[in-house]
Amino acid sequence: MAEIHNRMPSILAAGRIQQWIAPGPISSEQLAEFTEPYPADQMVARPVSSRVNNPRNDSPDCIAPISDFNRS
C-alpha cells in the first residue's frame, strides 16, 4: 500500500465481520487481531476514476477499473 498511499485501510477478513459489528466491548486481544495487516498477496491494485474522491458519488462506477470507462 505504501506505493499508493501513506495510510493502510483497515480490511476485515470475512470471518471477522460479525465479530467487529457485534455489540459490546472488544478486548485488547480481539482488537489486536483486527489490526493485523491484510495479506498483500490477497490484494489487487487497479486504477479507478477520480469519482471515488468525492463522498457524494456513491455508486459502483466509483470503483470500476479505468479500462471499463475506456471501452465506451
Image: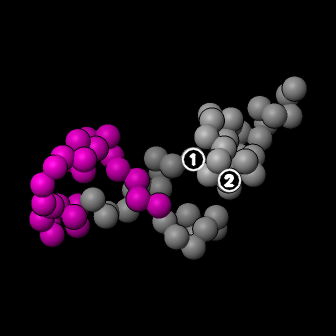
Residue 57 location in percent, x, y? 66, 44
Residue farthest to the top, as pictured: 72
The part of the chain drawn in magenta is 9-33
Taking the image as shown, residue 70 lies to the left or right of residue 6, namely: right
Residue to which mark 2 is pinned: 54
| Quadrant position of the C terminus in the picture | top right
Which mark lies nearer to you, 2 or 1?
2
Q: CA distance from mark 2 to mark 1?
A: 22 Å
| Quadrant position of the N terminus in the picture | bottom right
The disc at residue 44 is 1
Tell whether position 29 is magenta: yes
Figure check: 21 above or below 72: below
Secondary structure beneath dot 2 equals loop
| Residue at horizontal 31 percent and vertical 63 percent from the top | 36
Residue type of the residue flagged with mark 1: Val
| Residue at horizontal 64 percent and vertical 64 percent from the top | 4
